[in-house]
Amino acid sequence: MPQALVAGIIRCGIVLAATAAFCWIADASAAERPNVIVVFTDDQGTVDANCFGAKDLVTPGIDSLARRGVRLTQFYAAAPVCSPSRAGLLTGRYPVRAGVPGNVSSQKGGAGMPPEQVTMAETFKAAGYVTAHVGKWHLGYTPETMPGAQGFDFSFGHMGGCIDNYSHFFYWQGPNRHDLWRQGKEIHRDGCFFPDLMVEEAIRFITENRQRPFFMYFAMNAPHYPYQGDVEWLERYKDLAYPRNLYAAFVSTLDARIKKLVDAVDELGLRERTIIVYQSDQGHSTEERAHFGGGSAGPHRGAKFSLFEGGIHVPAVISWPGSLPEGEARGQTAHSCDWLPTLAELCGVKLLNEDIDGRSLVKVLRSESAESPHDLLHWTIGNSWAVRQGPWKLLGNPRDTGARASWISPDAPRNLPDPPKLMLVNVAEDPGETTDQSSQEPEVFQKLKTAHETWAASVR
C-alpha cells in the first residue's frame, strides 16, 4: 500500500484493517511490546491516597504502585466531571475537541462521544494488541458509541454514570434502570459486588491473553457514590467523622481491588512486562448523593465540577519496574491527555491520530530536570474555564463546589468569599487559590485572558 495513502487514512482518523496491517509490518514484533493497564478511579480526591498525603487512609495498593513507579504531583484531569474526563484520557484531546464538553446521557440510546474520535484502544488494537474495557464507560449508550465500537475487543461493565454495586441499577431521576453489560449484551449478576466482578473479569482477560500484548482500561466506579465500602473498612474507619468515614472505607475498598489486580499480574510473571497507569478522573464529589463530601483536596480549593485545583488536580502514578524509575516523584505540569502519546512512545506504537493535545511525558518520567511538555493548559466546563501557564492560572466564572462540603480537611482553605468572575492566582505560592492577583499582575492577566480567548475561538 502506498505510504501516501496510508498517511491520508491516518490523518482522517479512519481505523481500517489495512491500517492495522501496515502498522503491524512497520513496527517491531508486537509480541515484544509491554502490556498496558490504565486504572482510572472515580471521584477520588487530590490527596486521597497515603502516598499523596492522606494521613487517615490505608491504601497499600496505590502506595505500592508509587513505590515501584513515578508519582506525578502536578497532574491534571482533562475535566472536573466524568464523561469529558474520560474522553480526554482515551482520545488525547481536550474534551471539547473530542466532542464531549460535558456529561453524556446515562440512558440507553443516549448519544455519546462521536464514533469518529480515535481512542487509545483503537490505537493499540491497530498495533496488534488485544484490548479490554472493564468497569465504568459513560461515553455513550448506543451501539456505535459503546466500547465494542470504540476499539475494545472485550467489554464488561456499566454504560451510565453510576450504579448500585449489588443490584447494578442506575439510580437517578425517573425509573431505576438495570445497567450491567458484557460484550454488548445485558447480563444479570444480582448480589455480586461490582468491584469484585471487575477484578474477576480483568484477571480472566489477562490470563487468557498473557501470551500476547494487551491493553486494558480498568475504569473503577469507586469512590463515586453510592459509598459502599467493605464491612472491614467501615469498621476500621468508624471513628472518623461522617461522611469521611464512609468515603474512606470505599477508598480502601477500591485500593484492595487494585492490589488484587496487580498481585495477579505479578503471579502471572507479567509485572516487568506491564505498564500500569493510575489516575483519578477528577476531584471528590460534594453532591447530595455523596453525603455532601467525604473526600479531600488537601490544601486546595474546590471539588468535582470546579476548575479550582480541587476539581482537576488529581493523584497519578505510572509504574513499569525495570524500565522506568521507581519510588520517584515528578513536579512538572502534566495532563491526562498526555497518557496516549506517552504510552504510545513507551510501547513503540504509532498514533493513528496525531491531531491531539496530549504530549509525551517520557522525558519527564526519565529525568526530574526535564521541562514540562506544556506551555499552556486549558479547561472548560459549562460556562467556566481556566488556563494555566507556569505557576499562573486564570479562571473564568469559577465555581467553588468545595465550599458546600459537609466535611472539610484540616488543611483546606476556609471561609473564603465568593470568587470574582475573572480570577488570577499563583498556584505555586497560593495552592488554596485564595487571592486574586489580577490587579497586581495586569500583564499576566491580559496574556492569559488573550490565550484563552484565542484557544476558545479555535475550538468553538
Image (cartoon, rainbow, N blue to C red):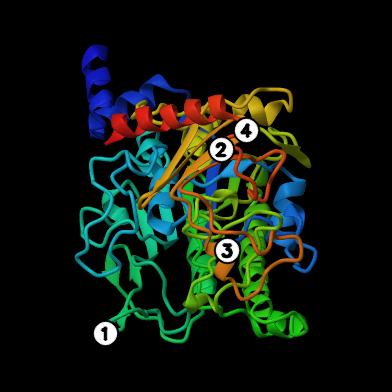
Q: What residue does disc 3 label?
A: 402
Measured Cα–Cα span from mark 1 to mark 4: 53 Å
The mark lying in front, picked from 1 and 2, is: 2
Vertical position of residue 260 compared to residue 163: above or below: above
Who comes first in sequence, dot 1 or dot 2?
A: 1
Q: Residue 135: horizontal and vertical position, in percent?
A: 45, 63
Q: Amino acid at mark 4?
A: Gln
Q: What residue does disc 2 label?
A: 393
Q: What residue does disc 1 label?
A: 175
Measured Cα–Cα span from mark 1 to mark 3: 30 Å
Determine crowd level at label 3: few under 14, some 14-19, many 20+ residues with C-alpha closer than 10 A: many
Vertical position of residue 237 compared to residue 147: above or below: below
CB within 8 Å, label 2 to label 4: no
Measured Cα–Cα span from mark 4 to mark 3: 26 Å
Q: Is 221 on the left-hand or right-hand side of 1?
A: right
Who comes first in sequence, dot 1 or dot 3?
A: 1
Measured Cα–Cα span from mark 1 to mark 2: 42 Å
Residue occupying the point 28% across, 25% down: 10
